[in-house]
Image (spheres, rainbow, N blue to C red):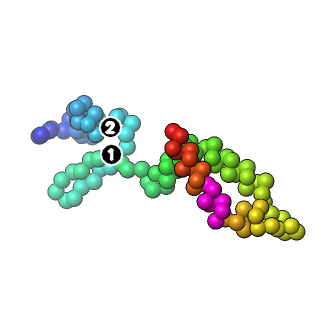
Amino acid sequence: MIKKLSTVGNSLALIIERPILELLDITKDTPLEVKTDGEALIIRPAKPSKKARLRESTRRMMAVHDETLRKLAKRARTNRCSSTSRTSSSCTRHNSRSTAAQLASEITACSSRR
């Protein structure tokens, strides 16, 4: 496809047709990455930063497993050991393998119900 630039104020603009915008899921609010390889202009939707992707992934995981994570946090609060009385069966800090295994089994059970 060959395109011509349009004048917009003191700048030039490239008009992109609706079918291409829809194909790439681009709206007027989509941030675009514009770069060149020395011969061509490359325009693509900007990828979110690793921090933003991690934040979004964590938000989705917490939404899916909210109930299980709340139960685990409640259990951890009630089972905290004190420096004066420490028992290996009730202390989540000192019994982390068991807690991790319980969390994994609860998440698996929760996921299978959905």
Name which residue type carries label 2: Ile
Residue sitting farthest toward the left: 2
Q: Is residue 34 above or below residue 90?
A: above
Q: Residues within 10 Å of mark 2 (few under 14, many from 20)?
A: some
Left or right of 70, for residue 56: left
Is 102 in the magenta?
Answer: yes
Circle 1 is placed at which residue position?
45
Count the marks: how many? Answer: 2
Sequence-earlier tag: 1 or 2: 2
- Residue 53 point in image, percent of width and height: 46, 51
Left or right of 102, for residue 87: right
* Secondary structure, magenta segment, majority class: helix
Q: Residues within 10 Å of mark 1 (few under 14, many from 20)?
A: some
Which contiguous range is marked in magenta?
97-103
In the image, 70 versus 23, the foreground residue is: 70
Name which residue type carries label 1: Pro
- Which label is found at residue 73? none
- Residue 65 point in image, percent of width and height: 58, 45
Asked whether residue 52 is in view, the answer is no
* Identity of the residue drawn at 68% across and 51% down: 72
User: Is label 1 in a helix, a strand or a loop?
Assistant: strand
* Identity of the residue drawn at 16% across and 57% down: 39
Is 111 in the magenta?
Answer: no
Left or right of 85, for residue 67: left
- Residue 35 point in image, percent of width and height: 27, 54
* Identity of the residue drawn at 32% across and 37% down: 26
Residue sitting farthest toward the top: 18
Q: Is residue 66 above or below residue 84?
A: above
Asked whether residue 50 is in view, the answer is yes
- Which label is found at residue 26? 2
